[in-house]
Image (cartoon, rainbow, N blue to C red):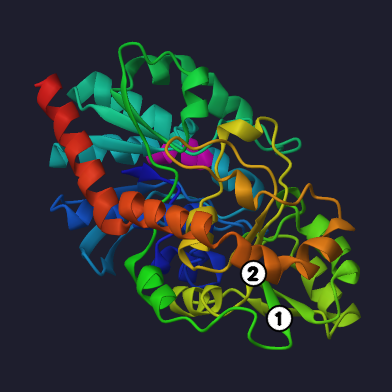
Amino acid sequence: MLANYQSPEFSKRYLNIQSTELGGQRKIGLLIRSILKAGWEVKVVSSAPTRDKRLKIQKHFRTDVVLKEGTIEVFHPVGLTFKVLSGLLQCITAPLLSSKITRKWNPDIIITYNGLFAEAIGSLYCNARYKTPFVAEIDDLPDARSRGWNPKPILDKSTWPLFLKKCSGFILVNSELKKYFDLKKKTNIILPGIVDDELIELSKARNDLFSNHKKELLYSGTLKIERGIDILISSIEYMPPDWKLIVTGSGKDEEHIVQASKIFPNKINFLGKLELHELFKKMCSVDAVINTPESISCLNAVFPFKIFEYIASRSHVISTELPCIEGVDLKWFQRWSGCKKEITKILSSAKEDYFKESEKRERTIKWVIDNFSLNQASNILSAYFQHIVKILK
């Protein structure tokens, strides 16, 4: 697998944190676990950049990561830790390392996470030189999110015409993405998310919702303005007095959350980044969970990874508009336009809405667990990879 994967050792050495386990990192981890569960051996070449403001050499190293389903080898290429140059240099060193490992290991298939520049170049080179097929897991388009003056999205987009042409198949987060690709001769599967077995088990034993006087609303995720935390913060003053906002996660704009918790100490509690087990416990103990509006150029071409986790937690779900997912109706919990004043009405009617939507909610939970549990994702991915390897032999 070629991916922007932060192994625990990398996070400790170069990010001064434990492995982040947020959004994309959690999905990469669950993809790996799903593949391991099906009996495949997995090696990962990481293109994860560092975020240090000082110029230091990032040494090439290999590390083992022990997961519930098995152990993977992760290779981090040589690079620089300087924040501005780190990502650009990985575009050169990660593909070179990918070629070296492919030559030595001769894998059956390469999984290219999101098909960004480093991963795309590595996949294309290995395909051209060693005839190794590769599958692209696409979460969003290269220019879906604004990156300011960062030239990386331009590089990411430059490789896509050839990358899409040579790709053997696609794993897409929703069917809307099909409109952006020529899939006439390409196979594809839809995988909006994967739900951890631990979360499913914890949700079965959760307490009754809305049973306490003080109710809790959870936001979990990356703390960035473009992910909508500014809108969430501006909504705090409009929350009914019997509600409290719980925030977990980390990100470059988390200081805004810290300041808000000082201004509204009775209305917001910032827990920082939680270990995965603690995050799942919190999801299964709050009354409601919220998905904020994001600044995205093509909303229908993405799908927030945490939505299926929110649904599986059995909490009351409050979300802004989401793209359609084949096989299920998700419109019923898309009740927030992003207007801060709407929060008053949405939270005031939350208990009534929760019980009114009981049938729809149970039907949706069953659909998510039946189709996107770790075990089911393992079966889907393994069958898909075997099909691609077979037809290309």
Q: In the image, residue 124 lies at what x, y percent?
A: 34, 24
**Residue closest to the far bottom:** 213
Q: Residue, x 25% and y 57% (percent of image)?
A: 375
Query: Is 383 colored magenta in this rendering?
Result: no
Q: Is residue 90 magenta?
A: yes
| Disc 2 crowd, CA 10 A, few/some/many (<14, 14-19, 20+) | many
State if disc 1 and disc 2 touch (CB < 8 Å).
Answer: yes
Residue type at mark 2: give it: Ala
Residue appearing at x 24%, y 38% in the figure: 100
**Depicted 345 relative to depicted 193: above or below:** below
- The amino acid pointed to by label 1 is Lys
Start-end of magenta stretch:
89-94
Vertical placement of 286 versus 141: above or below?
below
> Residue 186's spot in the image, x, y percent?
31, 18
Q: Dot 2 corresponds to which residue?
A: 288
The residue identified by callout 1 is 215
The image shows residue 389, relative to residue 321, as above or below, that is above
Q: Tell me the residue at 56%/69% (across/down).
A: 315
Left or right? Give the position of 119 relative to 293: left
In-front residue for pair 381/389:
381
The residue positioned 48% from the left and 64% from the top of the image is: 21
Q: In this view of the protein, which residue sits in the foreground, 81 or 87?
A: 87
